[in-house]
Image (cartoon, rainbow, N blue to C red):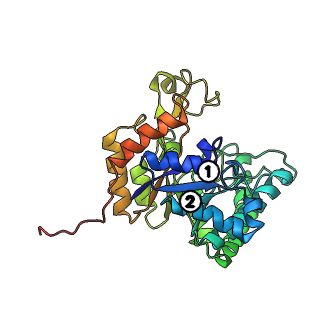
């Protein structure tokens, strides 16, 4: 396994400086944003695709520093009812597929998306309960008339570019937010659909990430190393559906934390061991969204923590029995 970093959090620095910093703290892989929600500070997609030499030079910059490119991220909402947004996110997704082909990166990370509740909607509508029955009608339309047809088509397109793994992050606010919904889309749209597994979004939903990994065996394409902490001082009064700003840390029911600050070594050792048991031995791409510490300090602490937890060597043989 390798510790990687989703470089978006360091986007205010040029890529060459970012790579030197990451190398100095023990990072071995990078995930680059190509647009949509993450932006493209380190990989300006249109410019990179405009000239083969630009694409070649950018990849050389990364690989010459010894980094693996674990994935290209275009996390967006391709199902957004506002066509100005959805068309741009679809464009970025499809252009990211082109760069994956050029760079021979086999996977892409994004979201499933969330439509509105009808063709004329202005905003996404994330359904969280089955009653009144209106909500079930919305879900049926969102899945069967929007999401499944879209992802069937995009999965076929991805295959044409040699991208075999579409890693969808299970994120509340989108149709795919837990193992059940991921597997539902995978069954309908094909086995290219898998998980960009981020335990931070599962903790606060009450999901055990290690049980979720077992459920998704064979469908985990990429992993985000990010933690979160549920604060019972608030959650036991108001629950975990919390719309207060992320900056209101003391009053929120939960917040994102750097790896090791939401859950300790016992959980993370169990997590990486479960990953290996289900056949994932790739990159754990660190996504820093901890508002209680700076990106530099958070990454330094989290990378050191995780490098001491992951198994760097190949799986051992059972030689004692």
- What is the residue that sits farthest to the right in this orientation? 120
Decide: marks 1, 2 in contact (CB < 8 A)?
A: yes
- Who is closer to the viewer here, 197 or 107? 107
Looking at the rendered image, the quarter that the N terminus falls into is bottom left
Q: Nearer the viewer, residue 149 or 56?
A: 56
Mark 2 crowdedness (10 Å alpha carbons): few <14, some 14-19, many ≥20:
some
Instruction: From the viewer's perspective, tell me whether residue 233 is left or right of residue 85.
Output: left
Which residue is at the front of the view, 135 or 254?
254
Q: Say which residue label 1 marks.
A: 15
Label 2 secondary element: helix
Image coordinates of residue 108 in percent, x first then y, are: 61, 63
Question: How much space separates mark 1 and mark 2, taking CA atoms?
Answer: 9 Å
Which residue, given by chain and number where applicable, does mark 2 sit on?
A: 62
- Residue 118 visible? The answer is yes
Q: Residue at x 32, y 41 (%)?
A: 265
Q: Could you tell me which residue is drawn at 51 percent across and 45 percent down?
A: 21
Q: Work out which quarter of the rendered image holds the C terminus and state it.
A: bottom left
Relative to 107, is 7 above or below? above
């Amino acid at each position: 396994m390798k510790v990687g970093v989703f470089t978006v959090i360091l986007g205010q620095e040029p890529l060459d400086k970012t790579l030197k910093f990451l190398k100095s703290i023990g990072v071995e892989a990078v995930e680059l944003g190509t647009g949509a929600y993450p932006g493209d500070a380190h990989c300006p997609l249109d410019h990179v695709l405009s000239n083969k030499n630009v694409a070649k030079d950018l990849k050389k910059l990364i690989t010459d520093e010894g980094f693996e490119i674990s994935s290209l991220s275009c996390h967006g909402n391709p199902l957004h009812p506002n066509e100005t947004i959805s068309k741009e996110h679809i464009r970025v997704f499809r252009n990211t597929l082109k760069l994956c082909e050029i760079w021979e990166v086999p996977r892409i990370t994004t979201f499933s998306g969330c439509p509105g509740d009808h063709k004329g909607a202005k905003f996404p509508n994330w359904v969280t309960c089955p009653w009144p029955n209106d909500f079930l009608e919305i879900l049926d339309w969102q899945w069967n008339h929007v999401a499944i047809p879209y992802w069937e088509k995009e999965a076929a397109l991805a295959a044409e570019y040699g991208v075999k793994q579409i890693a969808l992050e299970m994120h509340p606010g989108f149709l795919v937010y837990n193992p059940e919904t991921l597997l539902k889309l995978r069954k309908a749209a094909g086995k290219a659909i898998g998980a960009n597994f981020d335990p931070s979004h599962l903790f606060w939903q009450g999901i055990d990430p290690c049980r979720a990994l077992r459920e998704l065996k064979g469908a985990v394409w990429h992993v985000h190393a990010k933690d979160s902490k549920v604060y019972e001082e608030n959650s036991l009064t108001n629950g975990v559906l919390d719309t207060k700003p992320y900056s209101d840390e003391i009053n929120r029911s939960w917040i994102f934390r750097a790896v090791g600050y939401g859950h300790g070594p016992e959980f993370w050792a169990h997590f990486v061991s479960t990953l290996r048991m289900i056949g994932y031995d790739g990159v754990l791409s660190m996504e820093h969204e901890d508002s209680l510490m700076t990106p530099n300090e958070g990454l330094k602490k989290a990378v050191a923590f995780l490098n001491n937890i992951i198994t760097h060597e190949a799986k051992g043989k059972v030689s004692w029995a």
